[in-house]
Image (spheres, helix red, strand yellow):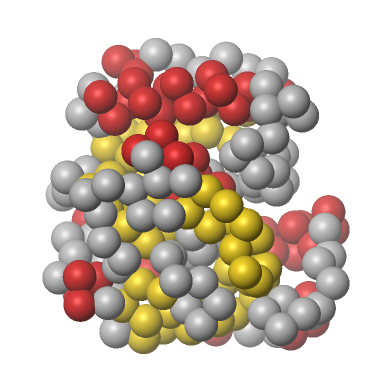
Amino acid sequence: MRVHWLQHADFEDLGCIAPWLAQRGDQVSCTRLQQGETPPSADSFDWLIVMGGPMNIYEYEAHPWLRTEKALIRSAIDSGKKLLGICLGSQLIADVLGGPVTRNAHSEVGWFDLELSEAGRRSKFFGGFPPRFTAFHWHGDTFALPPGTQTLMSSEACAHQAYELEGRIAAIQFHLEVTAANAREWFEHERPAPARYVQTPDHILGQLDHFAGNNRLMLQLLQGFAQ
């Protein structure tokens, strides 16, 4: 499979997704948007992975490439490609599909439980997930549900955490891909002030079992795409 992924910050990579793709022998390419690279046309890949980043999807003045990125996402959707969005990526895809992105009532950074909805339990991509599990979050914005989608899971701080469409588009606002090493690097660049739903770096980095559990769920989601 030809897999292309979009990067928005040098310190945010594919995490546990990278070795999974390498093991499969997929043809993997990347556009580093933050470095001014130009993304390819949608006919050059089969699957587009849109990763996270510290910016917001509407910060066009600071990040003018956001418009080009949204045009590529639109083209990939219209071309029938597979798409996976993670955090910022989920918001970008939602925006292109007609689900507005706004500030969430709370910033959510750390380990917080997610609960699958009835639609989530029937979901193609998430139906095999535990009905309730703990995931790593790092976001301040949230998406409204794009037309034709349903809430698949939610947390106490955020009503919409995942959606899917047409059996080929899936998006999560949390970070199953992040390893403990990834998280340590993130905290070298940003340390959000503790709040109701913002945990300390020491607490987050002390939960090594949670990272491993999240990575297993990420691989389970990827297998769903590969079928």
Q: Residue 80's spot in the image, x, y percent? A: 20, 29
Instruction: Please name whichever residue, 170 or 21, is drawn nearer the observer in this view of the structure.
Output: 170
Say which residue appears at 51% left-offset and 82% top-offset: 156
* Residue 218 is at least partly visible in this image: no
Q: Position of residue 126 (x, y in %)?
A: 26, 67
Looking at the image, can residue 62 be seen?
yes
Q: Nearer the viewer, residue 102 or 132?
A: 102
The image quadrant that residue 42 belongs to is top left
Answer left or right for 12 relative to 62: left
State the image coordinates of residue 162 (x, y, percent, origin top left). 37, 61
Q: Give the total of numbered labels.
A: 0
Residue occupying image coordinates x 21% and y 49%: 148
| Horizontal and vertical percent position of residue 9 | 69, 40
Quadrant of the frame with the N terminus: top left
User: Image height check: is 137 above or below 67?
Assistant: below
Q: Quadrant of residue 129?
A: bottom left
Residue 141 sits in which quadrant? bottom right
Q: Is residue 210 above or below residue 10?
A: below
Q: Is residue 128 left or right of residue 216?
A: left
**Image: 62 above or below 224:** above
Which residue is located at x 54 percent, y 19 percent? 68
Question: Which residue is rendered at x = 52% and y = 33% of the image?
Answer: 6
Is 140 left or right of 161, judged from the image as shown? right
